[in-house]
Structure formats: C-alpha cells, structure tokens
Image (cartoon, rainbow, N blue to C red):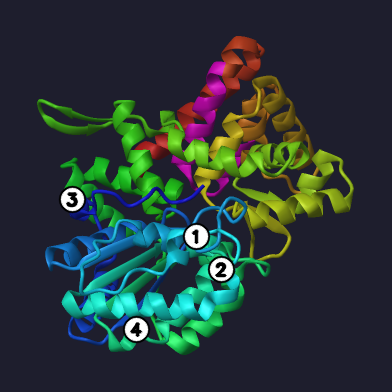
Amino acid sequence: MSTPPLSHLASSTARNLYGRQEDVAALQAAWRAACAGTGGLALITGEAGIGKTSLVEHLVATARHDGAEVLVGHCYDLESGSPYAPWAELLRNTSVEEEIPPLPTAVHEAGLPGIAGNRDALAAGLSAFLAALSARRPVMLVLEDMHWSDQASLDLLRAVVRRVSAWRVLIVATFRDNELTLDQPLHRVLPQLVREGRPLRLDLRALAAPDIQHFVAARYQLPAGDEARLVAHLLHYTEGNPFFLEELLRTLEHEQLVTLTAQGWRLGDLTQAPVPPLVRQLIDDRVARLGASTQRLLQLASVIGPVIPIEHWQAIAGVPDEVLAGAVEQAHAAQLLREMADHSSLAFSHALFREALYSSVPLLQRRAWHRQVADLLAERASPEPEAVAFHLVQAGDGRAVEWLIRAGQRAERRDAARDATARYEQALPLLEQHGPSDALAWLYADLAESYRYVDLAR
C-alpha cells in the first residue's frame, strides 16, 4: 500500500503539523540554502502514517509560493515498479523551454530494454537538464516511498546527488526505514547516499501527549475533563501515529461520539468507538499477506491481550515451536508485533492492530478462546483474579462471578475501595441472574462495605 500521490499540494498547508516544528524549520533552512545556490538532499524517514507526506506537502507549498519548479515522483511496490519509474513520473509534466536541454529519451521511455547500458549518458543528460532548469528558477525534486525504489532509479539518484550542491535544487526523498529489508535496493544504496550527499536526515517519530493535546484543543473546545479523556484515548489507541489519529477522530465524529451541541463540544462513551475503516483496511491488507495459519494465530493473540506471553500463546494454540516462530517472524516483518523487554512476551505494535484483529474473530470462537485463556491463568500458582475474571466475563462463563468477587476482595485488602466497588458492581447483575440467594446476600454486604470506604475516602 503506497502513499497516495501528492496532488493539489499548494492547498495542503491546512494540514496540522503539531510536534513537527523543528522538522519544518530544518527543511525550510535546507530549502533556503538551495534557493541561494547550495543544493542538497533531505531524507525523511519513519513508519507508515507518521507524517512524512504531510511534512513534504508543507514544504512543497512553500516552494510553489516561492515560484519554484516542483517535480514529484513516486515509487510503488517493488513487484509492480519499472526501472526509472519515479523519475519518469517526476519529469513527465515538466515545462521545457527552448534554453533548456531536452530530457534524455530514456527517461521518457522508462522501463524499456536497452537503458542499462547507457546509464552514464542518462545521468549526464538529466544533470544537464536540472542544471539548466535550476539556473532559471529554484527546483524541488520529491521522491516518495523510496523503500520501494528499483536499483536503476537509485543509481540515477546517486549520480544527481553527487552534482546537486552546485545547483539551486533540493531533493527530498521519503522512505519507511522500519520496513527496509536486506534484499531491498535502498538498504544497499543508503550508506552510499549518506556518504556522498551528506543529507539532512529527519527521523519522524510518534507524537507525544502534549502534541496530541494541542491538536485536540485546536480542533475542539471540549471541557477540560472531556479533553483529557479524549487525549488519553487517542494516545493509547494511536500511539502518536498522525494517520491513525486523524482516522480515529474522523470515526469518532462519524459515530457522533464527538459532537457539537448548542452548549458546545461534547464527548461520548469512548468504549463504544470502532476501529476506523481506513485503519482496518490497512491492517487487513497486512494480515492478508501472512497466510491463514498466521492470521489465526494473530487472532488468538488478540484475545489473549495487549501483552502476549509466548508460553500462554503456544499452550492455547497447540502448535509446534517452528510454526509459532514462523508466525512471529512474519508478524514482526509486517510491523504487527514487537518484542517486550522481558524477551518472553510480545505486544501489538499499535493498540488499533489488536482491536481490528479482535473484532475479526467470530463470536463463538472468541468466547471459546477467552475461556481457554481464563482456565490457563486460573491454573497458575498465584492467579491474578482480575485477569481471570475479565476473560470469563468475555466468555460468558458463570464462573466470572466467583473471580470478580475475588478481585474485589483483593482490591479491598490493598485499600483500593473504588476498584473493589467496580468489581462487585460488575458481579452483581450476573449473580442476580444465576446465583443462589445466600451468595447474593454476601455480595450486597461486601458492596455496602466498599461504598462506605469510598465515602470515607472522599
């Protein structure tokens, strides 16, 4: 899934760039240097959705405002790309003037046989074209998704980069550094590009809580409590990924969980928020490439929880070591799972990944897996009653009442009266439906006692 093509970029400055002020300043400085006659290369890296294209759009809007020639090319999945394809796209609609040398024929005919033998002439012709064009006005070249670039396009980039410092040209290349593999051409060429081009390199990372808070405050005028609740929800489910952030907010608005009333903005029950459709599609696309066996194992992992003890996963899955190891390797390569610091557990790379996988599990299968997880946890020497109770509740298993009461009692022993009250309140309707009257009486007594402690704590 490639980044959508840049189009109508001059209007893109409306996009929010919270948390990217230093990156914007660095790119603007590189652009000013290029306009003054010292060209260069800027590499923008980061995971999918982290904001590479938004940052480029902002810079492109500046360049067009300055009267520059802006040329944009994209790389697509390695299996579908052709040699020189990003350069051909980039130069296809260039305005050619009489004083500027014509583009090399090979660029117009990207992908045709016979080009490889004339790479030096191609590089020289393209360089002459760019030198002449930049003599008339500054030039910005944008190459998107270079992690999918072919070797020929990268060789041509290296040739241009070696000459660019003498031109009024800034080359901006984006790629996903976390998806580079040993067999991809960029993995081999990147050290040479860095050595020869001495580029500005911006490694975009996740937005922090203050960035998300500023974003939310600018978009809505929520009461302080609602704003804090929304920021916490966004931080948990998006982990600072701007694409996920935008899509989750769009979904919350569509589901009327964030609404503008006559009294102002209001926030609804965020526990009812679904996975955004575009995020779900992105996750489905990744998972679909992994095969049925790995998909099923990941679905099971989503039921186990946000953190997946490998021992538990294997015990419930009942698969050989090599099968689980293969699934983990595939999921790691697809950026779905990451290893925890204890080296005995895994976690989903984003909470939304788990949510999407979990919602794809049929109800009866989901309940069966929750019951298996609960049984496994209950057999431990010192079981965590909260965890066992959670899985039994999700399984629709009557034993949940016993474990909810245990969880409440443990919370009381830890002077956590509010937690105890929550567990007892959760157990009450289940016991009222199915439990004996004497057990119900004891629960009422425990609940009354917990209410008393909550009142005393106020």
Helix or strand or loop: what does disc 4 sit on? helix
Q: Amino acid at mark 4?
A: Val
Are the residues at dot 2 and dot 1 in contact (C-beta closer than 8 Å)? yes
Q: Which tag, 3 or 2, sits closer to the chain's start?
A: 3
Q: Residues within 10 Å of mark 4 (few under 14, many from 20)?
A: many
Asked whether, in this view, residue 166 is left or right of residue 156, the answer is left
Q: CA distance from mark 3 to mark 4?
A: 28 Å
Asked whether, in this view, residue 421 is left or right of residue 434, the answer is left
Where are the magenta residues, as a range? 406-429
Q: Residue at x 40, y 57 (%)?
A: 89
Q: Position of residue 456 (x, y in %)?
A: 36, 41
Q: Amino acid at mark 3?
A: Ser
Q: Which residue is mark 4?
A: 164
Q: Which tag, 1 or 3, sits closer to the chain's start?
A: 3
Q: Amino acid at mark 1?
A: Ala
Front residue of this view, candidates 208 and 148: 148
Q: Residue furthest left?
A: 262
Q: Which tag, 3 or 4, sits closer to the chain's start?
A: 3
Instruction: Determine if residue 338 is in view.
Output: yes
Q: Which tag, 4 or 1, sits closer to the chain's start?
A: 1
Helix or strand or loop: what does disc 2 sit on? loop
Q: Which residue is mark 3?
A: 11
Can you tell which mark lies on residue 115?
Answer: 2
Q: Position of residue 425 (x, y in %)?
A: 49, 26
Instruction: Determine if residue 51 is in view.
Output: no
Q: Which tag, 2 or 1, sits closer to the chain's start?
A: 1
Asked whether, in this view, residue 6 is left or right of residue 272, the answer is left
Can you tell which mark lies on residue 110?
Answer: 1
